[in-house]
Amino acid sequence: MAYPRQEANGGYTYSDYLTWHAGERWEIIEGFAHRLGPAPSRRHQKVLTALLGEFYNYLKGKDCEVYAAPFDVRLPAGEEKDEEIKTVVQPDIVVVCDKNKLDDRGCKGSPDLIVEVTSPGTASLDYIKKLALYEKHGVKEYWLVHPVDGIVMVYRLGTDGRYGRPEIYARDHVVKVSFFEDFNLSLKEIFGDS
């Protein structure tokens, strides 16, 4: 199995990605490889598990589905074949409401909602590259969750196809998912009291 070089001039595709060593996690953003670091902190995983549980329980019996990393989201630039796709990411949590986008490999096309629980090693990727990427591909909501500070930043896609300023929520707030009328998420349940 091959190991990618991060500086391969933006030429990596999903076909390359499928040959990489299974013991490491990588993402490709517009052809550039990004290695995901070692396992996240315990706090990161605790917050991620709490969020996943809330989404899973709410979506049971509904048309949308929730998945947690590692789960491949392929974002084609156009009508290229799977093997030619140059963007493959593994968000912490994805919610997909169009089941035509789901296959045995994951999701092909934009999920409706993406959640990234930030880690020191992925912060610039989450805040800069992925923010621009998800806006470009029309992800309706992008959440950046800060497990240490107990803060959630929610970017919502406007009618102009752009993210406005983020809505910022603290641990004593309730977050509403814009496209689910009755789903209100208490951050105290996610972050706890401390």
Image (tube, rainbow, N blue to C red):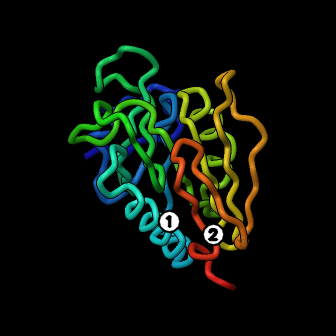
Residue 83's place in the image compared with 175, above or below, is above
The C terminus lies in quadrant = bottom right
Identified by mark 1, the residue type is Leu
Q: Is residue 88 left or right of residue 159?
A: left
Specify few, some or many for label 1: CA neighbours under 10 Å numbering under 14, 14-19, or 20 or more: many
- First along the sequence among labels 1 and 2: 1
Q: Nearer the viewer, residue 191 or 106?
A: 191
Element type where label 1 sits in the image: helix
The residue at the point 51 percent across, 35 percent down is 29
C-alpha distance separating marks 1 and 2: 9 Å
Is residue 69 at least partly visible in the picture?
Answer: no
Q: Is residue 54 left or right of residue 24?
A: right
Q: Which quadrant holds residue 136? A: top right
Q: What is the total number of numbered labels drawn onto the structure image?
A: 2
The residue indicated by pointer 2 is 187
Residue 51's place in the image compared with 33, above or below, is below
Q: Nearer the viewer, residue 55 or 49?
A: 55
Q: Which quadrant holds residue 13? A: top left
Q: Pinpoint residue 55: horizontal percent, then vertical percent.
A: 44, 59
Q: Is residue 3 left or right of residue 174?
A: left
Residue found farthest to the right: 165
Residue found farthest to the left: 104
Identified by mark 2, the residue type is Leu
The residue at the point 62 percent across, 81 percent down is 192
The residue indicated by pointer 1 is 51
Residue found farthest to the bottom: 194
Q: Pinpoint residue 104: horizontal percent, then vertical percent.
A: 21, 41
Element type where label 2 sits in the image: helix
Q: Pinpoint residue 185: horizontal percent, then vertical percent.
A: 57, 63
